[in-house]
Image (cartoon, rainbow, N blue to C red):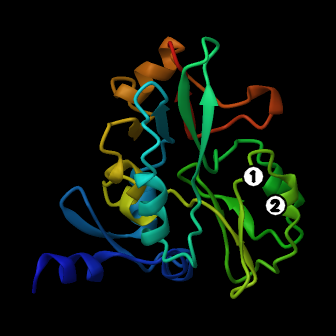
Amino acid sequence: MNDTNKKSRSVLSRKQFLKAGLAGTILIAAGGKLMTLDQALAEARGKYALIIDLNKCTGCRACELACHQRNELPGDMSYIRIYPKQKPDGSPYFLPVQCQHCVKAPCESVCPTGATYHHESGAVLVNDKTCVGCRYCMVACPYDARRYDEEKGIAEKCWLCLDWVLGGGVPACVQACAPGARLFGRLDDPDSEVSQLIASGRAKPLHPEFGTEPGILFYIFPGE
């Protein structure tokens, strides 16, 4: 079996993960051993952090493409968007935006069926089985992080490639980032790079004035 086939067999779709994972039946390779999702969660309770260094982001859109391919999204849809911005001196930079996995997630509070919920890892997920496609979450999200799949009738979003993460890996967007602008790690490890960057104040949430308390995504802004 070639490497491509090996990889395809090891990758779960978001739908497969939610369908099987919520019942704790997925076997995940973590720490060199196989365990169920429930067992992996018991060993991975601490929150994760994804930091995007805007000083390094080149706007290449590799993260967008990786997200599109990983989630088998229709058309050119991606859970990530890249916005061109300008620094105070007029020089350009790029701002990638996706779900911030907010602690006070407005998308969760407006969901009439409870389809949007907080996972034990800190990620905000959507249960395909109970989402009715009302799109209240899309209106409530101040980051415009939701994408509506017309064919499935579901409002979807970044799920942090959680099957890979719980198995000790990183999200697809982090893997694809050639300039190294995306840093991923654990917040419950005070010695991790992400923990130290957040503790130092260099890595900050996007639009803290929204009051949603982004729980996983942080940014190093130009000049920081």
Q: Earlier in the sequence, mark 2 or mark 1?
A: 2
Q: Residue furthest front?
A: 90
Please tell me whether mark 1 sits on a helix, a strand or a loop.
loop
Which residue sits at x=18%, y=60%? 32
Q: Quadrant of the N terminus?
A: bottom left
Relative side of 106 to 150, left or right: right
Q: Could you say which quadrant of the image residue 83 lies in?
A: top right
Q: Could you say which quadrant of the image residue 10 lies in?
A: bottom left
Between 124 and 60, the one lying in front of the other is: 60
Residue at the spot of label 2 = 138
Between 96 and 25, the one lying in front of the other is: 96
Which residue sits at x=49%, y=57%? 64
Identify whether 132 is placed above or below 91: below
Residue 184 screen position, x and y as percent: 40, 40
Q: Residues within 10 Å of mark 1 (few under 14, many from 20)?
A: some
Q: Residue furthest left?
A: 1
Identify whether 114 is placed above or below 213: below
Residue 70 screen position, x and y as percent: 43, 69
Relative side of 143 to 162, left or right: right
Which residue sits at x=60%, y=58%? 119
Determine whether label 2 and label 1 are within 8 Å by CB.
Answer: yes
Q: Amino acid at mark 1?
A: Asp
Is residue 161 something that shows in the picture? no
